[in-house]
Image (spheres, rainbow, N blue to C red):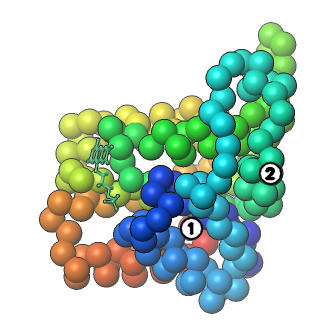
Amino acid sequence: MTSHIAIVQGHPDPARHHLLHAMADAYAEAATAAGHEVRRIEVAKLEFPLLRTQEDFETGAFPPGLEQAREDMRWAEHWVFLFPLWHGTMPALLKGFLEHIFRPGFAMEYKKGGFPKRLLAGRSARIIVTMGMPVLLYRWYFGAFGVRSFEHSMLGLAGIKPIRESFYGLSFADEQRRSRWLDEMRDYGRRAR
Ligand SMILES: Cc1cc2nc3c(=O)[nH]c(=O)nc-3n(C[C@H](O)[C@H](O)[C@H](O)COP(=O)(O)O)c2cc1C
């Protein structure tokens, strides 16, 4: 079955090609070759201000620089997020982007006195994170809190299910291991997972 996939590159560096970019390329190429449709969003290359007030969140003008990204995310039924772990969570640039995307009417419909309606049900997601520390340390010692809060407070709350995660620790990663990771991306891409 053909899937619509949005790949959101959350590495804040607009200039260099990092491992996360190679991972996104591998995922996208395999997905396209398998017949899925892919749209790509490079957050580092988008122009937008940070949200500063509740009024901005609720009724402020939506940044024109994010219109296409929001449309691509609405179009997709599977979202792939890639980001480097920065201070235990996603880089601020990606969080700033998502705060706009998740404004009322897109992810949640807020009702006075009631629980917000989830608008993203039927979609799934994969979160791909690289980190300096060993993955076991992030999972077991730090409880992966930064990624958990993204999963629960943003994606899960809006109805996205399942949410899969893939963590990669760079400290002991040689060329062979990195190339295995790219194969893993191709496998996910082929299966739109
Ligand atoms: C500002 C900053 C904060 C970081 N915080 C963490 C962290 O909390 N835990 C961790 O394991 N690695 C941390 N790192 C390492 C990055 O996760 C790692 O370098 C990145 O995943 C690899 O991508 P890159 O080198 O291609 O940018 C941090 C790096 C930077 C620049």
State the image coordinates of residue 8 (x, y, percent, origin top left): 59, 59
Q: Is any atom of residue 118 visible in this view?
A: no
Count of numbered marks: 2
The image quadrant where one finds the C terminus is bottom right
Closer to the eye: label 2 or 1? 2
Q: Nearer the viewer, residue 103 or 97?
A: 97
Q: Nearer the viewer, residue 105 or 111?
A: 105
Percent across and percent down for residue 85 are: 36, 48
Task: Between residue 126 and residue 61, name the one nearer to us.
Answer: 61
Q: Is residue 26 above or below residue 58?
A: below
Residue at (60% x, 58% y) in the render: 45
Amino acid type shown at disc 2? Glu
Compared across the picture, whether 185 is left or right of 88 comes to right
Secondary element under disc 2, as helix, strand or loop, is helix
Label 1 sits on residue: 193
Q: Name the residue rendered at 31%, 79% in the picture.
A: 180
The answer for how far apart the CA atoms under marks 2 and 1 are is 25 Å
Q: Nearer the viewer, residue 95 or 112?
A: 95
Give the left or right position of residue 92, taking residue 107 as reference.
left
Q: Is residue 22 above or below residue 139?
A: below
* Quadrant of res 184: bottom left
Tell me the tag on residue 67. Answer: 2
Q: Secondary structure at mark 1?
A: loop
Question: Within 8 Å: ligand 1 and the Cβ of disc 1?
Answer: no
Q: Position of 8 compared to 26: left or right?
A: right
